[in-house]
Image (spheres, helix red, strand yellow):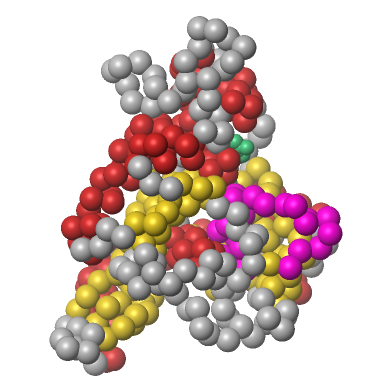
C-alpha cells in the first residue's frame, strides 16, 4: 500500500459502485490530510423489491450515478481525480514470493502466475503488480499481484462514461479497503482482519503494515441476511428488509416466542454462521501460509456492518475484538457532518484518499 507517496491533487472523488448501492466521497486535499466536502450513498435497486441477481442489469448504474453527481453539484466533465474500483469473481489479488527476477523477466513470470488465479486466456487479462520488498538474505521478492479481466474493466468504463465521467485510476476493492484502514489508523504491528460486508458478497482482507497481505471474497452479504429473515419469520422481502434494519440479529423483544436470526433450523446454516465459518477457515489458512497469528482486531465495514448485533456475534464466535469501523477518523469535517460516521463509506473513502 502506497502509504508514503506524495498526493498531488486538490480534490478527489472516490467512487464505489457496489451491486446494491453506489457510494461517492468527495474530498479536498489539505496541506496535511483531507477535508470531507460531501458524500452520498444511493441504492441502485428499487426499494422493497427482491433483487434477482441474474437479471440485475448493469444499465441501472449510470443513471443513478448521474443523479448523484447532479445532486452533489459535481460536473462530471470537470472531475480531475477520480478513483473507482472493481471486485468480485473476475479479479484476483495475491501476495506472492518469487526468486529475484530482473525487470524484463518479471512481467512475463508474473503473468504466468496470475493466470493461475484467473482461469482465462492471457490476452483477456490485465495485470498490475507492486514489488513490496526484496529479502536481504535470500534475494527473494515479495510481490503484490493484482489482475482483472478486460471485460470487467470495459463494463466498468462503460458505466462511468455513461454518466459522463472519464475513468481515472481503477483499483481493486480489497486494496482500497485495506488502504482506507491503513491511511486512517496508524498501526505499527499486528494483523488486522477487515470484512467489507456488501449486499451479495463480503471482501475479507488480512492486512498489517508488516505482514503478508491476503484477500478473498465470501459469497454472502446483506441480501442473504434478509433471506434468512424471510425464511425464519415468513415475511416477504420488503418486510424482512425492514425487520433487518430495525432488529438485525437481535431477538424481537415484543414477540415472546421469537428467537434470534442467528440460527435457522438445525438442518440449515444461517448467513451469520456461514460467514463466521468461512472467516475461520481463511484465518486457519492464513496462519499456516504466513506463519503469523498476531491477530489484533476484526473491523467491519460495508453496509452489512451496520447489522445490529453482528459485531457481537462475530466477536463471540471468533474470540477476537470486533468493531464496526468508522472510516471518518482522520478527516476534517464541516459542521453538518460533524457527528457522521458510516462504515458503508470505507471503500469509497479509501479510493478518494489513494495517492495519485
Ligand atoms: N442499517 C443497516 N442495517 C442492516 N443492513 C444494512 C443497513 N444499511 C445497509 N444495509 C445493507 O447493506 C447492504 C448494502 O451494503 P453495500 O452498499 O456495502 O453493498 P454493495 O457494495 O452495494 O454490494 P456488493 O459489495 O455486494 O457489491 C444491503 O444488503 C443493505 O440491506
Ligand atoms: Mg461493496
- Quadrant of the frame with the C terminus: bottom right
Residue 22 among those drawn in magenta: no
Residue 321: percent from left, percent from top = 43, 48
> Residue at position x 62%, y 12% from top?
254
Residue 9: percent from left, percent from top = 67, 82
Instruction: Find the residue positioned furthest to the top.
Output: 257
In front of the other: 88 or 341: 341
The stretch in magenta equals: 332-352
Side of 273 relative to 180 (left or right): left
Query: Splitting the image into 4 quarters, where does residue 295 fall?
Result: bottom left
Residue 64: percent from left, percent from top = 69, 49
> Residue at position x 46%, y 47% from top?
322
In front of the other: 296 or 344: 296
> Residue at position x 28%, y 51% from top?
283
> Residue at position x 69%, y 73% from top?
34
Depicted 255 relative to depicted 310: above or below: above
Amino acid at each position: 500500500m502506497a502509504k508514503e507517496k506524495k498526493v498531488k491533487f486538490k480534490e478527489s472523488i472516490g467512487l464505489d459502485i457496489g451491486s446494491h448501492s453506489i457510494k461517492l466521497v468527495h474530498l479536498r486535499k489539505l496541506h496535511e490530510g483531507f477535508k470531507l466536502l460531501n458524500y452520498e450513498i444511493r441504492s441502485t435497486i428499487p426499494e422493497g423489491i427482491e433483487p434477482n441477481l441474474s437479471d440485475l442489469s448493469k444499465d441501472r448504474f449510470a443513471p443513478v450515478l448521474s443523479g448523484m453527481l447532479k445532486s452533489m453539484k459535481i460536473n462530471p466533465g470537470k472531475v480531475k481525480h477520480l478513483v473507482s474500483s472493481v471486485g468480485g469473481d473476475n479479479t484476483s489479488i495475491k501476495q506472492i514470493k518469487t526468486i529475484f527476477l530482473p525487470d524484463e523477466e518479471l512481467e512475463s513470470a508474473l503473468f504466468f502466475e496470475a493466470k493461475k488465479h484467473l482461469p482465462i486466456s492471457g490476452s483477456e487479462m490485465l495485470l498490475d503488480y507492486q514489488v513490496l520488498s526484496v529479502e536481504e538474505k535470500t534475494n527473494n521478492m515479495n510481490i503484490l499481484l493484482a489482475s482483472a479481466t478486460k471485460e470487467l474493466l470495459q463494463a466498468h468504463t462503460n458505466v462511468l462514461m455513461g454518466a459522463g465521467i472519464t475513468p481515472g485510476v481503477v483499483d481493486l476493492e480489497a486494496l482500497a479497503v485495506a488502504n482506507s484502514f491503513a491511511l486512517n489508523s496508524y498501526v505499527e504491528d499486528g494483523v488486522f482482519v477487515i470484512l467489507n460486508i456488501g449486499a451479495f458478497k463480503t471482501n475479507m482482507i488480512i492486512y498489517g503494515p508488516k505482514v503478508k497481505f491476503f484477500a478473498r471474497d465470501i459469497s454472502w452479504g446483506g441480501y442473504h441476511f434478509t433471506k434468512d429473515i424471510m425464511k425464519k419469520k415468513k415475511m416477504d422481502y420488503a418486510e424482512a428488509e425492514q425487520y433487518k434494519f430495525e432488529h438485525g440479529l437481535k431477538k424481537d423483544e415484543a414477540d415472546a416466542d421469537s428467537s434470534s436470526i442467528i440460527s435457522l433450523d438445525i438442518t440449515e446454516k444461517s448467513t451469520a454462521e456461514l460467514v463466521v465459518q468461512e472467516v475461520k477457515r481463511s484465518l486457519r489458512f492464513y496462519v499456516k501460509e504466513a506463519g503469523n497469528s498476531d491477530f489484533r482486531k476484526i473491523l467491519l465495514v460495508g453496509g452489512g456492518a451496520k447489522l445490529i448485533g453482528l459485531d457481537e456475534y462475530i466477536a463471540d464466535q471468533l474470540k477476537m475484538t470486533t468493531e464496526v469501523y468508522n472510516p471518518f477518523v482522520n478527516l476534517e469535517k464541516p459542521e453538518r457532518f460533524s457527528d457522521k460516521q458510516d462504515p458503508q463509506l470505507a471503500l469509497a473513502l479509501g479510493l478518494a484518499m489513494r495517492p495519485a
